[in-house]
Image (cartoon, rainbow, N blue to C red):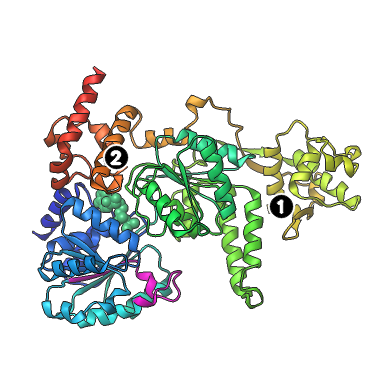
């Protein structure tokens, strides 16, 4: 009986046809009156796990969340779907606050979102007397732990808050990241009673992963964006300065871009964030300050202009793409410089003298893992998942490495040329970084080379026919193998390592190298998206209709003063493009269409589709 009820809500309220992994188990546990601790990655669909019980249980469910912007968002989305939701946090005026309290008193609120700091300020006895709170949800539950990365003192009040409510409600805690220590903290500090614990997998099958090692990052970025002009996404940069530069470049090149970093004043940050969320601007260029608490579900791509310092940060940031389940792309533009900069930041951290060597070593190891991801030849998805301790197949078919042909090639001769060059330079008492060595090998006559008289070096120009990209790849490989070494933190130079056997031709070196890709024509650039679409059966996707639907969605959203994705997610629009429903009954079967949305938007959308189909004939 109960399972039918939750399924009905899934279908009729949210408009979805199947549960995602873990959702049913959590809902069942909560409905059975059991405390719960769920660790689910971003985009897994945690909200639904407590929203469905909240809709089924009598009384008002209280959701404690640290993210004020997200609260407003969730409440808007729930109201849009026809649920009585409200929030209490510091962004409300006194009058609004009073109004919400009145609605609560009148029993008109089904789901109440509240900031942890408000728990003390709100009269707990009021909750206690009513006897109408069946469930308390703790979102971002890792905030209770000092071990977590965003500790919130307000979270320490939660256990008391729950205890103050009679009868004691069920407590359900959710988080996307929790190590064992943090999980234990959550259980202990929130005083969960023998909780049902669940951790769902980290894989996000709709995400396509790609690493590029471009010579010219700006050019590569422009190409990436050009291919994705009809979707919206985030470009993450390592520094404020990079954000400024990239933002300026994009605006100059005619992209609809905004910027976000901690150096901008509050007003501009908020305005830019809203422009992005409300789809008035399509590209957000930001530092990692952007994203926490941003719930825009229709992000079609996340491009990292710089490599982050560890895989956790990378996966969290990249994971902001495709939260609605629609295909989305996560692209890292890697450059060796990123490693040096990150190393420098780790070893010159602000703590200065108090720097903890163990922590530094730990962070350097995390950086090494990240670098390994950026340079590995095997499946990228497998790398990510195995970092999080999950087994995954060696081939996912949906990342740039799985889609690139690698050939095992003998690089002994090229290796000897490169090593000899470094060796000769050392004989002359000179040491240089990678770029200079590549320039010498390729026979450049740049100013520095002439000044040092390197044109008459016997290894000058001996690899003139080889691309600098390929030389760099082999050079990196030789460093990894220990044949060459890299010394110095700030301005690393290359030296000779254990290379005698290679130089004496006693050892052959084999290496997996990508087949040189043919330069693709502009119309045929998007290998990634093409495969994405093929993988999701969207080969003959109706782009024209999609554009019309987006426009319609934008109009409706503007009229209601909500972000576009709250009207319908990209995943819903894609489903409409596939199904082309020309009647309300058929429209009801679209992903994300519940009864309220059907009534509210069904007709306009069906009209739009009819018109489009008519035009096609
Ligand atoms: P999380 O909080 O875990 O990051 P959300 O709860 O915000 O994720 O859900 C991410 C997106 O997935 C939302 O757009 C949500 O509506 C959608 N979603 C959740 N559950 C399902 C489901 N069973 N089927 C389809 N879409 C779902
Ligand atoms: Zn793969």
Q: Position of residue 379 (x, y in %)?
A: 50, 46
Q: Position of residue 52 (x, y in %)?
A: 18, 59
Measure how far apart labels 2 and 1 are at the Cα level: 52 Å
Q: Position of residue 336 (x, y in %)?
A: 65, 50
- Which region of the structure is painted magenta? 135-154
Q: Is residue 580 left or right of residue 233?
A: left
What residue is disc 2 on? Answer: 554
Q: Which mark is residue 479?
A: 1
- One can see residue 568 in this view: no
- Specify the quadrant of the image occupied by residue 130: bottom left
Residue 605 falls within the magenta-colored stretch: no
- One can see residue 172 in this view: yes
Q: Which is in the foreground here, disc 2 or disc 1?
A: 2
Q: Residue furthest left?
A: 1
Element carrying mark 1: helix
Q: Is residue 17 left or right of residue 305?
A: left
The foreground one among 316 and 295 is 295
Residue 148 falls within the magenta-colored stretch: yes
Q: Is residue 231 left or right of residue 112?
A: right
Q: Residues within 10 Å of mark 2 (few under 14, many from 20)?
A: many
The foreground one among 54 and 499 is 54
Query: At 55% across and 47% down in the image, what residue appears?
Result: 305
The foreground one among 219 and 17 is 219
Image quadrant containing the N terminus: bottom left
């Amino acid at each position: 009986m109960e399972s039918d009820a939750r399924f009905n809500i899934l279908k009729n309220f949210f408009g979805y046809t199947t549960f995602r992994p873990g959702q049913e188990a959590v809902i069942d546990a909560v409905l059975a009156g059991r405390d719960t601790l769920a660790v689910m990655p971003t985009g897994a669909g945690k909200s639904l796990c407590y929203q469905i019980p909240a809709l089924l249980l009598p009384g008002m469910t209280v959701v404690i969340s640290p993210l004020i912007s997200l609260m407003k968002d969730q409440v808007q989305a729930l109201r849009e779907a026809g649920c009585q939701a409200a929030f209490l946090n510091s962004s409300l005026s006194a009058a609004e606050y009073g109004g919400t309290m009145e609605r609560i008193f009148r029993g008109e609120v089904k789901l109440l979102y509240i900031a942890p700091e408000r728990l003390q300020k709100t009269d707990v006895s009021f909750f206690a007397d009513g006897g109408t709170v069946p469930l308390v949800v703790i979102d971002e539950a890792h905030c209770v732990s000092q071990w977590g990365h965003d500790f919130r003192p307000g979270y320490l009040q939660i256990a008391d808050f729950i205890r103050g409510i009679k009868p004691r409600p069920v407590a359900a805690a959710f988080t996307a990241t929790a190590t064992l220590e943090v999980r234990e903290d959550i259980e202990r500090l929130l005083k969960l009673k023998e909780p049902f614990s669940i951790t769902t997998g980290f894989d996000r099958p709709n995400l396509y992963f790609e690493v590029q090692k471009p010579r010219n990052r700006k050019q590569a970025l422009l190409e990436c964006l050009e291919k994705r002009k009809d979707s919206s996404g985030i470009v993450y940069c390592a520094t404020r300065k990079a954000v400024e530069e990239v933002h300026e470049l994009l605006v100059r090149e005619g992209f609809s871009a905004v910027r976000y970093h901690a150096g901008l004043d509050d007003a501009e940050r908020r305005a830019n964030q809203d422009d992005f969320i409300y789809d008035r601007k399509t590209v957000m260029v930001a530092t990692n300050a952007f994203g926490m608490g941003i719930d825009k579900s229709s992000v079609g791509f996340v491009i990292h202009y710089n490599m982050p310092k560890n895989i956790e940060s990378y996966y969290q940031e990249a994971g902001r793409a495709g939260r609605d389940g629609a295909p989305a792309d996560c692209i890292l533009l890697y450059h060796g410089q990123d490693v040096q900069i990150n190393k420098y930041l780790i070893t010159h951290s602000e703590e200065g003298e108090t720097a903890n060597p163990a922590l530094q070593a730990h962070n350097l190891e995390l950086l090494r893992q990240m670098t390994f991801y950026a340079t590995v030849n095997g499946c990228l998805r497998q790398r990510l998942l195995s970092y999080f301790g999950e087994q995954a197949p060696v081939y996912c078919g949906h990342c740039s490495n799985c889609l690139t042909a690698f050939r095992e090639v003998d690089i002994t001769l090229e290796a000897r040329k490169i090593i000899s060059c470094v060796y000769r330079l050392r004989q002359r008492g000179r040491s240089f970084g990678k770029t200079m060595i590549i320039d010498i090998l390729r026979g450049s006559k740049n100013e520095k080379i002439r000044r040092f008289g390197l044109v008459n070096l016997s290894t000058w120009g001996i690899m003139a026919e080889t691309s600098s990209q390929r030389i760099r790849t082999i050079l990196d490989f030789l460093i990894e193998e220990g044949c060459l070494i890299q010394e110095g933190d700030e301005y690393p130079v290359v030296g000779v390592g254990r290379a005698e056997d290679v130089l004496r031709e006693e050892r052959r070196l084999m290496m997996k190298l990508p087949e040189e890709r043919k330069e693709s024509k502009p119309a045929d650039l998007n290998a990634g998206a093409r495969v994405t679409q093929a993988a999701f059966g969207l080969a003959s996707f109706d782009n024209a209709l999609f554009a019309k639907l987006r426009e319609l969605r934008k109009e409706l959203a503007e009229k209601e003063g909500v972000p576009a994705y709250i009207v319908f997610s990209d995943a819903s629009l894609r489903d409409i493009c596939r199904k082309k429903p020309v009647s309300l009954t058929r429209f009801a079967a679209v992903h994300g269409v519940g009864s309220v949305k059907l009534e509210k938007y069904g007709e306009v959308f069906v009209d739009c589709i009819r018109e489009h189909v008519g035009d096609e004939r």
